Amino acid sequence: MSEATLTPQTSGGAPKKAKISEAVIRIAGNSQDGIQAIGGFLARLAGRSEQEVMTFMTIPSTISGGPSIFQVRIGSGEVLSAGDEADVLLAFYQHSYEGHINSLKKGGIVLYDADHVEPKEEWKKDYHHVGIKISSLTVEAIGGTAKDKGKNIFSLGLIARMFDLNVPKLEKLVEERFTGKDPSIAKTALMAFHAGYGYSVDTVMNTFQFVESRKHETAQVVMNGNEAIGYGLIAAGVRFGAGYPITPWSDIMELLRRELPKYGGTFIQCEDEIASVSMAIGASYAGKLAITGSSGPGISLKSEAIGWAINAEVPLIICDIQRGGPSTGMPTNIEQSDLFIACFGSHGDAPRVVLGPSSVEDCFYTAIEAVNIANKYNVPVIILSDQAIATRIEAFAEPNLEKLCQDISPDLSPVADHKPYDLSTPDGTVKRVVPGTQILSGKYPIATGLEHDEMGHPTGSPKLHMAMTAKRRKKLQALAAALPLPKVYGPPEGNVLLIGWGSTDGTIREAVDRARAAGDSVSSLTIRHLNPLPNDLENIFSGFHHVFVVETNDEGIYGYGGQLCSLLRARYCDPKIRGINKTDGLTWKVKEVLERTKILLDAKKA
Amino acid sequence: MSQTISTTPAATTATATTAERKPLTKKELAADHPTWCPGCGDFSVLALYFKLIEKAKLHHEKFTTIAGIGCSSRFPYFVQAHGAHYIHGRALAFASGVSISRPDQHVFVFGGDGDAFSIGGNHFNHTARKNIKMTYVVMDNWVYGLTKKQTSPTSPLGFKSKTDIWGAVDQPINPMKQAISAGATFVARTTHTNPNHVLQMMEAAMAHDGFSFIECLSECVEFYEGAFDASNPRKGGVFNTVPADHDVTDEAAAYKLAGEAFPGHFGVFYKVNRPTKNAKEQEIITNYRSKVAGQKDWQILQKTFDRLK
């Protein structure tokens, strides 16, 4: 919470410059207005200013246009979520104003484009209204027509003035962004920025200044979750990928297509989802551990091929950037409803690994972890991200790339003998031997989807099917035994333990902070290893009276909870594990988590 | 070391016995005894594949044999070399991953008409148009054999099967036309009853730099006996090779040959040189690599991260 609330100027008093520790700014307009660019600039500035930042955006699933928002929360201390309520709403249109006034906290500031917005009298008492003719002032500053771009950069200037932001740093960001294009574009952008900054907003309202943030030891990098996965895979040594476009996964394939050639690798756009998973599996089989990915329906289409990789014990990385389902569902909305398909989505007993990154930074490290697990256990690993993390921008400590970057090229030295499906190893893992390797015994392995003997040749033997099924399962059991136990956020014992996975992590932790500040006994646990689950979670659960699993998915037919909740109940048979679920396609708000926790507690008391 | 997909991995050139390794013999190449029915045309394709490898002096680590699902797709189990038996219809996509990521490998794909033209039809078109380097032999028997006599995409009209007891009603696919129109750069036709011709076509296909496709008629003695008798002189048919004056670079002429009534002609219908997908990807890589010459991978990534600050 802000140290000084962003309050409107009281009549008569001279405008002041208040010290604040954080601010939530929501920019609402249409998708073609470049509002993501304003948010992006603010996020990058925060990263360069050692501040913490988190963003949240919505995009319409229409081809062009449609209402869109970008929310950015900047703080001098820890920022865990994009914020429940905005301190400032920048509204470009009447629909932006009317549609988002409710997201503004009482007493917050609505900065509106007076060329397009007619403020409502009844809202004036609750919110401080500041009308500025953003469209016409932009035209005045840089020429062109009101339909042209530029008002986003003008508004960035306004915000910079309001929050006393670092102008040289912003100018540099604007220049960097427009470098490479026509030099006049960068010049025009800076003119728009200065026009906004020069507008004397401080004569009509209070302005603010962030308190100095704590010093970070290393520089920060600013990116979204999809970028973090892409760069993490590159650091991990992945040099081949294949995919098919689908929202919100496409950013990763575009990034890898663009970046991999620099590293001697390539990413192939395929004719369909099945071809892309198959091509990736082919490359993995050939010794180049490969990545494919998708969202929604694309994951369903890949399921058969993933089953082959499990049976053939070929490693593979699959990114599932979840969106609302089933079927085409809600392509640009948030949901965590692919956990079951990630864990079980193939016919037959088909054990695979599922990891759920819990922040943008975690996306980077999870990608590396996924590659190393896949390589060690010869198993497909699914990185289960979602639309919220995919598009969210965060600043995080720059990774030590020299230390982290690894070479995973195949070893093609001749071997004396090789059994690809050796049953004698205790944990079921076998070092892979790939095409190009001479095997001196003259006996060569076949990678296969049929049940097979130790050399990969087909068998219908009940004994071998039992042994091979157990072998594939044992690998995951060995992995589970090696997994670290996740750390409880808050005290390890208490009344309520909130469990989350993926993008809800920060919001749930903020809910814990708020509940504890109010005197409630609440802790939380984020599970990153979703399949297999780490061992000994029951030792954590035993410290709490209630275990509530917060998920952005349906409560299920039997009503006790969503998909992770079901897995935990199946494993621990503990009725104190209950679900807190929602399916509105939006991120959780801190207050929602707290209200729903209270409702569930009250229901259990009754 | 940077992990260029293009460079031949160092170890492949340093095999254990570099000194004068003899060509592989049929004995060294044969693995499991084929599970095909006695008399199946696929036996001769397998025997000629062994001969091809032997004549080309390819060693075990130089080639990969890949198949999807079907009777003929059991192929890799019968070959003593690196191989994969993939899922139904997707062998070409899998093989593309091997081909593009491992340019040191000769990639051979074997399959049937159902795998190629029904469930895998989309991949056939796109692998052909992208000209991904590999040799694809479709053993066309005009019927589903593994599942015991259902109509296949190449079954002629009127063919009685378990799914068309009154005779097939759907227009069959013409594999040669399909390959030419999809953009395959090498399209040939042969039949299992003429072993020398099969070998000739395989050798020409293997030598082609691009996606080389062979339709090899391969009789299913169990479910479609006598299907190809009209092309077999020993059964009173005629085996006509492509006319000497046929221009293999003439797409329209090739298409016309493909449209002839059965038994038609045998041989190379179409062959043109067009850059492979493999070469085009390599060109992109070479271009990008020249811009980062001398930098380690982590340094390249560091430069990107510096821009994200």
Image (spheres, coloured by chain):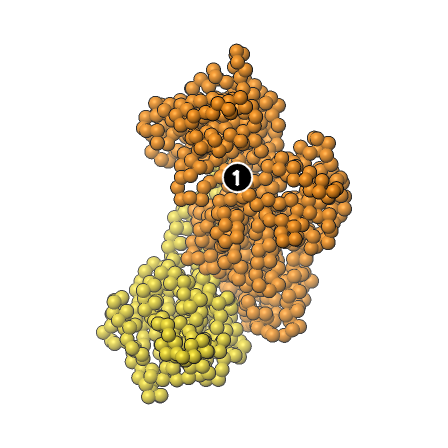
Chain colours: A orange, B yellow
Percent of width and height locating residue A415: 57, 65
- Is residue A504 visible in the rendered image? The answer is yes
Q: Residue at x 68, y 54 (%)?
A: A480
In the rendered image, which residue does mark 1 sit on?
A: A392
When the figure is inspected, residue A302 is found, relative to residue A367, above or below; the finding is below
> Do we see residue B9 in this rendering?
no
Residue A118 rendering spot, x and y as whole percentages: 43, 25
Identify the residue at image location x=61%, y=32%.
A78
A173 over A227 or under it: above or below: above
Q: Residue at x 24, y 76 (%)?
A: B244
Query: Between residues B159 and A150, which one lies in front from this camera angle?
Result: B159
Between residues A517 and A428, which one lies in front from this camera angle?
A517
Q: With B76 as the anchor, is A478 left or right in this view?
A: right
- Give the percent coordinates (x, y) of residue A450: 56, 69
Amino acid found under the numbered disc labelled 1:
Arg
Q: Which residue is nearer to you in this view: A87 or A359?
A: A87
Percent position of residue B186, x then y: 34, 67
Compared to A525, does B309 lie above or below? above
**Would you call the spot at circle 1 few (<14 residues within 10 Å), some (14-19), or many (20 or more)?**
many
